């Protein structure tokens, strides 16, 4: 009996040793994979250290194979296939827009750089309206849905089966009963709590509702998220910006309180650029091309030049990060940025520092109240290097600040879905509306001024006065910043 127990213990010991050896070997191979595949050296180092360091490896190893990939495979191929399928409806779009004087011609310099990043042209004669906070945004969106005659395109990162979600659902069901076609796409990561009852109700009514399928090639892969928030009605009006579908975006959350966010309402030829972004995502998810309006038309009273910039991990370049760097480098007098997250890479940090050294008024507005602890902690690690060159960091106090907005001098304003962090730069599918118009910039500047009035300026002392454990958390979060 005693010998049998020893045999069992020996077997368990050998099995345990083999399991640990296998785990360590897998961790080392994963670290090598991270070094070879990561887009940035910082990301490679962060993953490699985490993967080979006990006890971090026990967390890092499964996390790497869920979150570690940095390129979205297959989308470009699908997009090219989709372009073939869409050729019949899109072949005349560019020619018609040029004939109607709705796009810039002979574009050079900065404009050419931005157009090459977007793979889309600046369009003329648009009308863009700022929609500040949830009530204004969803009043406009639901009102536009009520006017739909042909089709509605809906795309959100987060959709919830709550008061706002059900209101959207009912409006769509009403239009479906009128015979309006509806294509509805949601991100399955962001909308993981969306009930099957909600989806089935829409589907049974004839709404074509689909997940984006970012994990089609790897069911455990959660890294690539379609963070876009888009609504298009009949190809004549579009919406894009920071708000998802959930009661918290209407300020109904007890934990967050007032929710500060911004959306844009677009009319004019830029609507078709937003529609094209949706269509490429829709084709990836469904391999189908719905019949849509592709006739560009000027907006009534529209005088604004607009560039629509879709970005994502399928791009051959790191388009979103390059866009931020380009806009920061162009600033001569003013650079104001609002973002819920501040985890930039070294290139964006350098661009911000150089702007401040040029004498640009650089201000970055962040929330006082966090929703993601590690991202919140990481933002403190940048205070000193920003303060040293004169970059001012503001913390918005009344509630949660979620808007993604940027002002550059008196010339450009950007409203979109991209945060000032590595995830938006490299991993998320995002969309930005860039408006070149002094009147729109003045309106956006007033919006910023109103928000700054509800902020406090944060200095490096704000970190120095914190506890030792908080500072340790900040340093750990900074080390992990490339993979947050």
Image (cartoon, rainbow, N blue to C red):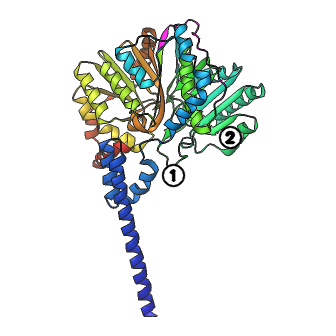
Q: Residue 92, how many percent across, how many down?
A: 58, 17
Q: Is residue 304 magenta?
A: yes
Residue 98 point in image, percent of width and height? 52, 10
Mainly helix, strand or loop, the magenta region?
loop
- For residue 245, say whether it is visible: no
- Say whether residue 64 is visible: yes
Q: Which residue is mark 1?
A: 220
Distance between the Cα atoms at labels 1 and 2? 22 Å
Does residue 311 appear left or right of residue 95 in this picture?
A: left
**Which residue in the rendered view is the most extreme toward the top?**
301
Query: Which residue is label 2 attached to?
Result: 199
Labels in figure, total: 2
Q: Of helix, strand and loop, which one carries label 2? A: helix
| Neighbours of disc 1 within 10 Å: few (<14), some (14-19), many (20+) | few
Precedes in sequence: disc 1 or disc 2: 2
| Magenta stretch in the rendered image | 289-305
Residue 255: percent from the left, percent from the top?
51, 39
Residue 175 percent across, percent down from the top left:
73, 26
Q: Quadrant of the C terminus?
A: top left
Tell whether label 2 touches label 1 (CB within 8 Å): no
Q: Residue at x 38, y 69 (%)?
A: 20
For image coordinates 38% across by 25% down, the residue present is: 337
The residue located at (56%, 19%) in the rendering is: 271
| Left or right position of 156 against 344 | right
Quarter residue 22 falls in: bottom left
Between residue 127 and residue 319, name the one nearer to us. 319
Describe the element under mark 1 as helix, strand or loop: loop
Which quadrant of the view contains residue 412? Answer: top left
Q: Could you say which is closer to the camera, residue 195 or residue 104?
A: 104
């Amino acid at each position: 009996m005693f010998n049998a127990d020893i045999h069992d213990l020996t077997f368990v010991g050998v099995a345990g040793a083999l399991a640990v050896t296998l785990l360590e070997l897998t961790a080392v191979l994963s670290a090598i994979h991270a070094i070879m595949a990561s887009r940035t050296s910082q990301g490679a180092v962060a993953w490699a250290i985490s993967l080979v360091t006990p006890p971090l490896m026990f967390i890092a190893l499964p996390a790497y194979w869920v979150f570690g990939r940095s390129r979205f495979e297959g989308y470009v191929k699908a997009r090219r296939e989709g372009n073939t399928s869409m050729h019949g409806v899109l072949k005349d779009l560019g020619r018609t827009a040029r004939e109607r004087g709705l796009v810039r011609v002979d574009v050079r310099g900065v404009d050419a750089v931005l157009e090459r990043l977007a793979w889309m042209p600046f369009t003329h004669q648009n009308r863009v309206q700022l929609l500040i906070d949830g009530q204004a945004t969803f009043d406009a969106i639901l009102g536009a849905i009520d006017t739909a005659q042909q089709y509605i395109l809906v795309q959100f990162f987060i959709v919830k089966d709550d008061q706002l979600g059900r209101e959207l659902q009912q409006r769509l069901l009403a239009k479906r009963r009128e015979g309006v076609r509806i294509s509805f796409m949601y991100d399955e990561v962001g909308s993981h709590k969306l009930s099957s009852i909600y989806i089935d109700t829409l589907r049974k009514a004839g709404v074509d509702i689909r997940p984006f399928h970012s994990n089609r090639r790897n069911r455990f892969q959660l890294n690539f998220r379609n963070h876009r928030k888009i609504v298009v009605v009949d190809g004549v009006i579009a919406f894009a910006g920071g708000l998802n579908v959930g009661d918290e975006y209407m300020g109904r959350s007890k934990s967050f309180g007032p929710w500060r966010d911004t959306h844009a309402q677009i009319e004019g030829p830029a609507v078709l650029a937003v529609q094209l972004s949706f269509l490429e995502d829709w084709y990836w998810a469904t391999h189908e091309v719905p019949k849509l309006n592709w006739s560009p038309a000027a907006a009534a009273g529209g005088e604004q030049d607009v560039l629509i910039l879709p970005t994502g991990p399928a791009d051959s370049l790191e388009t979103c990060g390059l866009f931020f760097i380009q806009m920061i480098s162009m600033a001569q007098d003013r650079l104001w940025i609002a973002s819920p997250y501040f985890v930039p890479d070294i290139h964006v940090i350098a661009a911000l520092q150089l702007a401040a050294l040029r004498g640009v008024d650089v201000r970055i507005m962040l929330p006082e109240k966090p929703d993601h602890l590690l991202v919140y902690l990481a933002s403190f690690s940048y205070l000193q290097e920003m303060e040293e060159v004169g970059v001012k960091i503001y913390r918005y106090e009344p509630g949660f600040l979620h808007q993604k907005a940027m002002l550059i001098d008196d010339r450009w304003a950007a409203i979109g879905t991209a945060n000032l962090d590595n995830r938006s730069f490299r991993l998320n599918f995002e969309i930005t509306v860039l408006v070149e118009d002094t009147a729109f910039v003045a309106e956006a500047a007033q919006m910023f001024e109103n928000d700054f009035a509800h902020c406090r300026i944060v200095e490096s002392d704000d970190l120095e006065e914190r506890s030792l454990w908080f500072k340790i958390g900040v340093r750990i979060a900074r080390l992990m910043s490339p993979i947050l």
